Amino acid sequence: MQRLATAFAIAMVLAFGAQAASAQTLKAVQDRGQLVCGGNGTLAGFGMPDPQGNWVGFDVDFCRAIAAAIFNDTKKVKFVPLTTANRFTALQSGEIDLLARNTTWTMSRDTTLGLDFAGVTYYDGQGFMVRKSLNVKSALELSDAAVCVQQGTTTELNLADYFRANRMSLKTVTFATANEAVRAYDTGRCDAYTTDASGLYGERLRLADPSAHIVLPEIISKEPLAPVVRQGDDTWEDLVRWTHEAMLNAEELGITQQNVDDMLKSNSPDVRRLLGAEGQFGQSIGLTNDWAYRIIKAVGNYGESFERNVGQGSPLKIARGLNALWTKGGLQYGLPVR
C-alpha cells in the first residue's frame, strides 16, 4: 500500500510539474503583452517588411493570427528576422516564442534539437531557376552547371543528392545567406539558383529583370514547412497547431473575414464549435472560447491568407497545388474541432 501511495504521489508531482511547464510560454506572452515571432525578413510573400516597415507575408499572417487568438489584436507581435544559421538557437534560447520561417520539418530536427513542429502550414519542394537565354527546359539538363545555393541547409544536401542520383556533374557555389546566393546568381556567377519552389517565385521578383528567368518544372524534394516551438510546453504547441487548424477549418466551412459574424448564427454544429458559439474548446488551450472567431475576423481563413500573400492575388501568383484543401485534391486537411 505504501508503495502505491508513493507511486501515486510521484505521479501527481510529475503531472503537476508537466501542467505548470505546459503553460509557461503562453503566460510569458500574456504577461509581456506581445508575441515574439521569428521570421525570415527577406522572403517576399512569406515574411519581410514592406516599404513602410510593416511586416507582411504568409508566415507573418500566421503569427498575427496567434496574436489575434491571444490578445484580439494582430499588432501585438514583435518580428525578429532570423537566418538559417541562427533560427533554431533563437528559439532554443528563448529569444523568440515561435519560429514561423520557411523551415522544413525533418526527422533529425524533430528529434535532436529539443524542438517540436506544430503542423505543416505549407507543402513545398525544392526547385531550380535559370535564365531563359540558357534554353534549358528541365533540371536534368543542368549537368556541369554552376548552381548557387545557401550553405548549411537541406537545400544544399538535396542538390547534391539529386545530381548524384541522376549521374550528373555538379559545380556547387555556396553562400552563407540567401541574399548572397541570389545576388551572385543575378550577376551571372551561376547558371542556376536553387531553393524551395515558393522561395524561387519570391526571389525572382528581386532580380534585375524578373521576366528573364524561369522556374523549371522539377520538384526534387519534399519540404513540409512548419512553425516550430520548444519541446515540453504542450499548451503552447497545441495553441500554435490549432491556430493553423482553425484557419483550415474556416476555409472548409466557408467562413471568411467578411461573413464570420453572420456565420455565428449558423445551425451547423461544426461552425458553432469552431466559432465558440457552443462547447468549451478555447479553455483547453488557455484561451477564451471565441479564439477561432478572433483569428478569422482579424486575419481570415487559410485560403484568404494564401491568395493575398502568395497566390493569385499576389505578385507571386503561386498555384495552390499541394496546398489546396483535401476536398479539392490538395493535402491541407483541417483536424476536427469537437
Image (cartoon, helix red, strand yellow):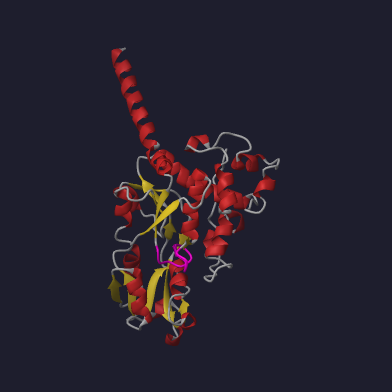
Q: Tell me the residue at 53%/59% (across/down).
A: 323
Task: Give residue 277's quadrant in the image.
Answer: top right
Residue 220, image x, y percentages: 41, 67
**Residue in front for this viewpoint, 73 or 171:** 73
Nearer to me, 225 or 243: 243
Q: Nearer the viewer, residue 61 or 231?
A: 61
Residue 135 sits in quarter: bottom left
Residue 163 visible in the snapshot = no
Residue 43 drawn in magenta? yes
Q: Could you say where residue 302 lies in the image, as x and y percent from the top left? A: 56, 55
In-image side of 166 versus 68 (left or right)? left
Q: Is residue 42 visible?
A: yes
Q: What secondary structure is the stretch in magenta mostly built from?
A: loop
Q: In the image as oriented, which residue stretches furthest toward the bottom?
A: 133
Start and end of the magenta stretch?
Answer: 41-53
Which quadrant, please, contains the C terminus? Answer: top right
Q: Which residue is located at x 44 percent, y 52 percent?
A: 77
Looking at the image, residue 30 lies above or below residue 304: above
In the image, what residue occupies the spot 47% across and 71% down? 201
Toward the top, the furthest residue is 1
- Front residue of 287/34: it is 34
Image: 17 above or below 39: above
Residue located 35% across and 43% down the image: 231
Q: Position of residue 1 (x, y in %)?
A: 31, 12
Measured as percent of width and height from the top left, residue 26 is found at 42, 41
